Amino acid sequence: MEKFIALGLREDIISAISEKGFTEPSPVQEQVIPILLNEQTDIIAMAQTGTGKTAAFGLPLCNQITPSKDTKALVLAPTRELAVQVCQEMSSFTPNSKLKIFPVYGGQPFRDQARALERGVDIVVGTPGRVIDMIQRGKLILDDLDFLVLDEVDEMLNMGFIEDIEFILDCTPKDSQRLMFSATLPKRIENIAKKYLTEPKTVKVERSKDIQNLIEHVYYETSRAHRLEALNRILTLEEDFYGIIFCQTKAETEVLSSELNNNGISAEYLHGDIAQKSRETILNRFKSQKSKLLVATDVAARGIDVDSLTHVINFSVPESDEAYTHRCGRTGRKGQKGKAITLAVSNEIGRLKRIMRATSFTIEKKVVPDGKSIAFTKKEQFNKKLTTVEPSESNKEVAAKLVEEHNPEEVIAKLLELHLGNAFDTNAYKTLPTQKDHGEETLIRIEKGIADDFTGRTLIPFIEKKGGVAGRSINNLRIKRHFCTFSVPTKDAKAIVASFNKRCETDSGKPFAVEEGPAKSSERSGGRKFSGRRSGGGDRRDDRRGGGGGGPRRGDRRDDRRGGGGGERRSSRRSEKRA
């Protein structure tokens, strides 16, 4: 702990982090903590997920702030889970202190959070949407704010929160100390830093070598039609699996989780539309390893801070090298080895190679396990289970009777057939071809959506039944409030639309619209064109749902902002205030 002591932290904080297992500061902590403790300058810190950013700003904030009724620090996080995690982590730094640290986020009763703020909170950790609600309703007063921390700014940019961040920055005192933490520094974030930060110090932590050295990176090339079967086989071969499978959309998490459970692989899913109480229950089960496989979107997985994950699986190739690095950084932590697996169809290989070049990671190509490997592994797993099971006396009596009355080999074979089917039969597993996915796809739109009680679990069977299409041919499923879209091979599109128009009727007997369009044209709001891109929204702004927010959101909101923008900041006032 000598290095932490040398940084100048209080004894009670040193004691607390020692009990938590901290031994020496990470690179980002070693650079950021002294600046926050000894200087009044703004900071831009560039560091990846899992590098100890929370302690980098949390420890000095807890060290500097003394309990009062005024809010002295505001920490913004992109998701509810991350906000809760940051709050819990910071609270653990000062367990015996009267310092009040409180999270505000959507999905929880507004009134309860507002009352807590009215009673006085020293450090507020929140998501942008709920923080704005609190500011506009006069529940969160920032007049005496000393610190503003923007955590994972690049993720907030990706989620569309940048205008919200600017609004909050405009509401904070010009002389407050401002910190930005981000894995990358896109141009938009650079512009915000220039406008709102005064001569900031930049701390840049090089990409951790652990992601390359401790994590085994592999990918399997498969076809869309066989991607699920490939995943099933990979999960069968991977021992002691405890990890996350990342999907691109909320609907995909539901469908994949359901398919895995149907195949005997226990899995839960997590995305932005799940009620907060349910999300917390799912996360608690996962963190306690009562459930060991979580299917999640990138946004929903924010805040899942588990150091012992053995695997990360990309069900498809991530959109960017930053996304790939963020995902993989969730395994291989604290000196433990991990594995990052990516499933790629042929038209995703180019993107995967770009990720390799950008990250300098070596991602080894592997062949999807064949029937012989799967059958052999299942036999080994079964034999291992046999050695660990202790039968009851009643079962022993039944076994003795069966052996006495029947051929023992025949009895065992029948029991295996009853409970395991053809799991040990090599011929039961067909060869999975790596089909070239160069065929064109067409996007189909159905005028039914969430408002009609459609979810990822119910929509796929509906499409299969009414459209006469196999589920494996359905791609890019997007479910919106009043419509949904999905793509199918162009050669089958007209027949599928015809089948829908023939079979689809509502409960009242009235047909509803089913249309087709080219998968690469642009989808405009209110129009009838379609896009292979994600239609707007996604997991964006999920912290606002169910939160009871109020006040203006867009349009005239800029005119209502308090405080000045990013012009000249009064550093002399800051020094006086902090002295």
Image (tube, grey):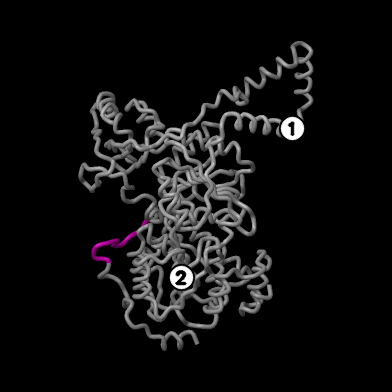
Residue pictured at 50% horizontal, 62% vertical = 48
The disc at residue 149 is: 2
Horizontal placement of 121 versus 407: left or right?
left
Residue 555 belongs to magenta span: yes
Q: Residues within 10 Å of mark 2 (few under 14, many from 20)?
A: many
* Disc 2 and disc 1 in contact, CB within 8 angstroms: no
Q: Which residue is label 1 attached to?
A: 389
Q: Quadrant of residue 567?
A: bottom left
Residue pictured at 27% horizontal, 26% vertical = 495
Which x, y percent locates residue 502?
A: 25, 24
Give above or below for 280 relative to 207: above
- Viewer-proximal residue among 258 and 112: 258
- Viewer-proximal residue among 296 and 347: 347
- Viewer-proximal residue among 99 and 154: 154
Which x, y percent locates residue 194?
A: 36, 75
Residue 254 belongs to magenta span: no
Horizontal placement of 323 versus 312: left or right?
left
Q: Is residue 118 visible?
A: no
Pick whichever of labels 2 and 1 is earlier in the sequence. 2
Which x, y percent locates residue 87?
A: 53, 64
Q: CA distance from mark 2 to mark 1?
A: 53 Å
Q: Quadrant of residue 345?
A: top left
Residue pictured at 41% horizontal, 89% vertical = 572
Residue pictured at 74% horizontal, 35% vertical = 388
- Kind of element beneath mark 2: strand
Which amino acid type corresponds to the residue marked 2 in the rendered image?
Val
Q: Which residues are magenta?
A: 548-557
The disc at residue 416 is: none
